[in-house]
Image (cartoon, rainbow, N blue to C red):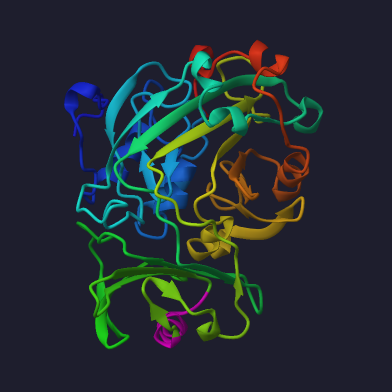
């Protein structure tokens, strides 16, 4: 594929479910004039499904990449992300968890949507007005660099997991269960057939202690389970012991030692909004003081990350809310690291260097502010701020 090509509205909708698309996104991450999802978010959504998540972690510091609009497990790479000009018909790339059907039960392509940046005049009349959040510059140690907002219109609602489980004894581990999903393995090599729950499933092992297992139940529902920090036998045995009915997990069947993370109520909403604020030196060249905060509607749980890369995650909290710090960069580095938490409405993702404690200290001081706050009104639009990337 030509590395100079950027999808445009003239290209029409694309289905990026092929096996090579994540490699394509990784290649684009090395180009300064392309707008694709931040590679660390590609890792979070795809890392447990695709072996290429290791390649993605190598390039997570590319700051020029525009904020992604993540509709649950559906990630929309955009011609026009928050901070970029225009709008485009885009494809929701294969990123791990895709709904099987629309909210009304119809069969549609849930991988396709339209993403666009929002002009400031649109912010006040959209859910962005409730999302605007800032960090004190004294907490970041760097000035406010830019702000941006955008929206993604999908064909299906964001998928909400049936259960998100985690445990810390004897080591950190996670298990997430999704119901009524599309086949997550389109074009995927390296699958193994595993017997479970009276049928067979397809298991993928992206790393030594991370697993994905998908199967179709007798009622036709496709399930997807993700786990990290446990071995394969324990994973399959745990799934065999679950009581599943109508897309729900009976908590009584969860083995002792697991905790259940709170998850939002499922929604039929198909349009998602995103707020992004960036701190750091104003010049185009990358500086290590760069920090980005993103806010979106809560659709799953920060603990989902534990089921995808437990070894690179740390369980913590922000103002009493469950939080997960994840390292997505090269081994021994926190380049591209992120801290994710959520409250009753929103998910927050804070990205920056300096370790979990530094990001946690910043996050504790995040505050919702009025959209007409002078700090927001006086801040440059991200689309107008030059950025050469990391």
* Magenta stretch: includes residue 231: yes
- Residue shown at 55%/63% (left/top)? 306
Callout count: 0
* Magenta stretch: includes residue 143: no
Q: Is residue 32 left or right of residue 386?
A: left
| Viewport quadrant of the N terminus | top left
**Residue 65 in sight in this render:** no
Q: Main secondary structure of the magenta part?
A: helix
- 231 or 37, which is in the foreground? 37
Indicate the position of residue 221 as horizontal and vertical percent values: 27, 70
**Residue 136 in sight in this render:** yes
- 14 or 286, which is in the foreground? 14
- Residue shown at 51%/27% (left/top)? 126
Indicate the position of residue 258 as horizontal and vertical percent values: 60, 77
- 274 or 361, which is in the foreground? 274
Pick out the residue farthest to the front. Answer: 104
- Residue shown at 23%/23% (left/top)? 9
Q: Quadrant of residue 84?
A: top left
Indicate the position of residue 276 as horizontal and vertical percent values: 56, 29
Q: Which residues are magenta?
A: 230-241
Pick out the residue farthest to the right. Answer: 138
Q: Is residue 249 left or right of residue 212?
A: right
Q: Quadrant of residue 269?
A: top left
């Amino acid at each position: 594929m030509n590395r100079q090509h950027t999808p445009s509205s003239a290209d029409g909708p694309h289905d990026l479910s092929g096996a090579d698309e994540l490699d394509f996104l990784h290649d684009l991450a090395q180009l300064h004039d392309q707008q694709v999802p931040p590679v660390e978010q590609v890792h979070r959504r795809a890392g447990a499904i695709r072996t290429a998540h290791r390649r993605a972690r190598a390039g997570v510091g590319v700051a020029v990449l525009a904020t992604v609009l993540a509709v649950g497990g559906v990630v929309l790479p955009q011609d026009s992300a928050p901070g970029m000009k225009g709008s485009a018909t885009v494809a929701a790339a294969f990123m791990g968890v895709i709904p099987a059907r629309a909210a009304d039960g119809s069969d549609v392509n849930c991988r396709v949507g339209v993403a666009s940046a929002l002009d400031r005049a649109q912010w006040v009349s959209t859910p962005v007005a409730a999302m605007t959040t800032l960090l004190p510059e004294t907490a970041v140690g760097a000035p406010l660099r830019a702000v941006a907002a955008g929206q993604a219109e999908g064909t299906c609602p964001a998928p909400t997991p049936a259960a998100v489980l985690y445990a810390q004894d004897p080591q950190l581990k996670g298990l997430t269960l999704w119901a009524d999903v599309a086949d997550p393995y389109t074009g995927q090599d390296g699958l193994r057939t595993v017997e479970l729950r009276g049928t067979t499933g397809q298991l993928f092992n992206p790393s030594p202690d991370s697993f994905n297992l998908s199967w179709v139940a007798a009622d036709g529902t496709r399930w997807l389970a993700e786990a990290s920090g446990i071995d394969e036998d324990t994973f399959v045995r745990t799934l065999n012991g679950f009581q599943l009915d109508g897309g729900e997990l009976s908590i009584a069947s969860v083995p002792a030692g697991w905790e259940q993370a709170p998850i939002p109520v499922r929604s039929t909403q198909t349009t998602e909004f995103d707020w992004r604020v960036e701190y750091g030196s104003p010049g185009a060249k990358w500086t290590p003081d760069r920090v980005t905060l993103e806010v979106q509607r809560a659709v799953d749980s920060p603990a989902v990350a534990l089921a995808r890369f437990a070894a690179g995650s740390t369980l913590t909290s922000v103002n009493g809310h469950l939080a997960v710090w994840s390292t997505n960069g090269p081994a021994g580095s926190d380049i591209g690291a992120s801290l994710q938490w959520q409250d009753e409405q929103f998910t927050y993702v804070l990205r920056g260097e300096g370790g979990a404690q530094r990001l946690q200290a910043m996050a504790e001081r995040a505050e919702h502010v009025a959209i007409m706050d002078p700090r927001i009104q006086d801040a440059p639009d991200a689309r107008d701020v030059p950025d050469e990337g990391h």
